[in-house]
Image: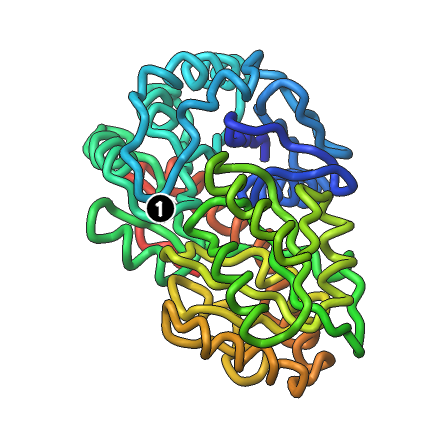
Amino acid sequence: MRIALLAPLVTTIRPPHEPQSGGSQALVADLAAGLAARGHDVEVFAATGSEIVGVTVVDTGVDHRDLGPVLFRHGEAAADPSLSGWAFQRAWRLIARGDFELAHNHAFDAPAVTAASDLGVPIVHTLHLPVEAQMGGALREVQTSPSPPTVVAVSRRQASDWSKVAGVDAVLRNGVPVERIAWSAEGGDALLFVARLSPEKGAMEALDIAAISGLPLVMAGSDYHSEYAAAVRARCRAEGVELLGPLGRERVWELMASARALVCPILWEEPFGLTAAEAQAAGTPVVGFDRGALSEVIEAGRTGLLVPAGDVAGTAEAAAAAGRLSRSEIRGHAEATLSFEATLDAHEALYQRILEDRRRGSRHAAGVSE
């Protein structure tokens, strides 16, 4: 198949040894490389400065810094779509020239959906974030068109949430390159927090959990929400907590393998939980709040411990108890249920079904699920 992947344009995609901006960017890089390795002709359309080893990356001419005002901020009103419309119109024009059989969008911006409505080839949109009104309106608009796209969620919980505002045609679970992630049967003493520094990821709660448990904490994350990040940095300095800043995926995997547990005190409906999957591949248990899809990624009591949302003290107790979980069983769970090979299989199956339906003249690949 000849496939175009549209990456989020608000950040660049970088190789695994360099800092990566988010889970959807990592997913696009893994998906592109995996499909190419299976013999598909794949091109990724991304922000200027992006690179994926072994994959053709087309520079859209969009400087991600120009899209700073449209960064998704949980709990805040979405930005005016005109601020990013020009970028996605440019990207889709480039894709239209490429003679692709199918195009798959991973950008979470309403214009990324509406600007693709007349492309002339089957379109897939993956929803990488929780429900947002502007994106929901864009999806409903294109789903009533003569050639509606296929809309994909990354977890059953996310699909259930989105189905209240727009149609969801398939659930394609995320996965991680388990075979590339070294694991440790021992771990260490410190807790680990890895996420962008924005309120919904719970960095402040992670600091509370460490303080209550008496366990050391290592933190790594990019300054996504500037005021919040500044407050986190100030508290880390005051409490002697190591804050490493943004790291490459390979370095994050090393930290995970040497951690006592990954702490995920999330304050939103987590669409999937890619870092939780990576931690388990490293043999490391996950402790955190039971929100969103984390319960689909973690086998509670075996590969991690989830407590009711907002229960900081309970999470501190879980962090202390996490050392009793078997790290070899945690790694086995990741190998059996979180492998990226299964994610690739699911994407290939969906693409083939869409193209077969197109050849038969069917409306779209409705009813496809994980």
Q: Visible in this render: residue 341?
A: no
Instruction: Please tell me which residue lies in front, 287 or 90.
Output: 287
Q: Position of residue 316 (x, y in %)?
A: 53, 76
- Residue located farthest toward the bottom when viewing the structure as drawn: 324
Q: Quadrant of residue 291?
A: bottom left
SS at badge 1: loop
Instruction: Please tell me which residue lies in front, 332 or 12.
Output: 12
Circle 1 is placed at which residue position?
Answer: 365
Vertical comparison of 55 with 80: above or below: below
Q: Is residue 179 left or right of residue 121?
A: right
Vertical comparison of 90 with 319: above or below: above
Identity of the residue drawn at 39% across and 19% down: 84
Q: Position of residue 192 (x, y in %)?
A: 65, 62
Q: Position of residue 101 (x, y in %)?
A: 51, 29
Which quadrant of the rendered structure holds the N terminus? top right
Mark 1, other Cα within 10 Å: few <14 / some 14–19 / many ≥20: many
Q: Visible in this render: residue 48?
A: yes
Identity of the residue drawn at 69% across and 73% down: 260
Identity of the residue drawn at 44% across and 53% down: 154
Vertical comparison of 223 with 161: above or below: above
* Amino acid marked by disc 1: Ala
